[in-house]
Amino acid sequence: MLVALTALGLALVAGRPVGNPGPGRTLDVVLVELGAGLLYLAAAALVLRRTLPTGALWIVLAAAFAMRALLLPIAPPLSSDLYRYVWDGRVQAAGINPYGFLPADKRLAFLRDHAVFPHINRAYTSRTIYPPAAEAAFGVAAWIAPGVAGMKAMMLGCDLAAIAVLLVLLRLADRPPAQLLLYAWAPMPVWEFAANGHVDALAAALVALALLAGARARRGLAGVLLAAATLVKFLPVAIAPAFWRRWDLRLAGVFAATIALLYAPYLGAGRRVLGFLPGYAAQEGLLSGRGVFLLDLLRLVMPLPGWAGPAYAAALAALLAALALRYGFGPPLPAAAPARVLLLARQAAVLGAVALVGVSPHYAWYFGWLAPLVCLAPSPALLYLVAASVLLTLDPVHHPGIAALVYLPSAGLALGVRPAARSRR
């Protein structure tokens, strides 16, 4: 049924314009994704509550690969971000720093074509926003397989790598292999990675690999992978404290050194190495607080002062810091691999979910790097968050009503399940 719904979604987007065509043309696709989400949640309940035969893993893998194979050949239907990836890779292949120029700069006119350049978002107004690890990946893709198809194949390869690593982690944690479907069947990674080719697939793979390194007590390698994931999407930095324990200078030092090494090749751009990040944060309302779901919800019932945004950011930072101190200065990680994997995944999932819900992104693919953690640390709240994130595709103007359907039920599930879990312990 999931594969059939994916095929239906493919038929709905066939022949449509590249990129986000607006809410009127995405509603039908989102409804298909929501239907797939209901099936996904039903399958998750089945695999978490029952003992399935060993052969169930082959059903999980077959359906996961079939859904991705259907969507791989099409042009990105719901986002044009992939064209910026291809452009940035092309610029680097020409020996040019991607942070230095707008795509529309006349000095880059020799790189333009009719297949990529017309679809680049903000080509005339903004330099690239993507951090150095993402840019390095774009450059590699441009060298190995230039073009839209090559970039999509690379992102799908990262998605499949995450699946492979999660299978290893499930075996290491003594969990049923069929539990892989908690990631492999989630509609959001299927559509955002296989169809739209978002770079968050690389962040998901790096997070899964960091979890594997942490499970095997490879602290230095975990630090490298966490730093790389951070410089793909920035937000994964929130989960780093789950891997750190008091006075662990190796992980912290390697993390900082990797950040510096990844930025080094691009420092020729000077202050512009941050690209469009400050402008993007302002445009999305993250600096003023007008793009944050909780504050937008409060504004519906009462006026908020100008300092509400900075105060909210400080409160979110304090909450994440408190969680980080609790985990970092808490008991050491278990020596036994199964307990170690599950504890790392659970703490990282809590940190990642708090950061994402606190920031309340406006796009579904921002939850892509959280999905591998949910596979090993499932809860009703996190499963709902991953499944419902596709609703954000309908939210081009960041209306709090749509965001409420994503964040409020997830928060309610978290608050409702936690006391019962504590009682059982």
Image: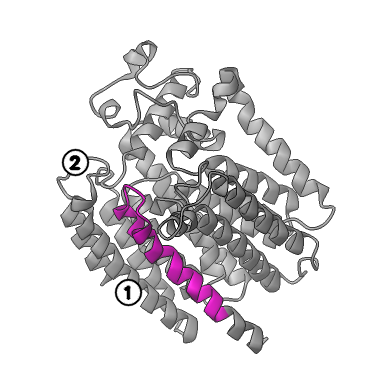
Tell me where the magenta segment starts and ends, as one range.
Answer: 391-417
x, y percent for residue 393: 32, 53
Left or right: where 322 falls relative to 225: right
- Quadrant of image for the C terminus: bottom right
Q: Which mark is residue 17?
A: 2
In which quadrant of the rendered view does residue 399 lie?
bottom left
The spot of residue 178 in percent (x, y) is 46, 74
Most extreme residue toward the top is 107
Left or right: residue 272 versus residue 211 is left
Residue 126: % across, % down:
41, 26
Front residue of 309 and 153: 309
Tell whether 322 sits left or right of 30: right
Q: State yes or no: residue 412 in magenta.
A: yes
Quadrant where the N terminus lies? bottom left
Q: Which residue is mark 1?
A: 39
Amino acid type, mark 1 = Leu
Q: Which mark is residue 419?
A: none
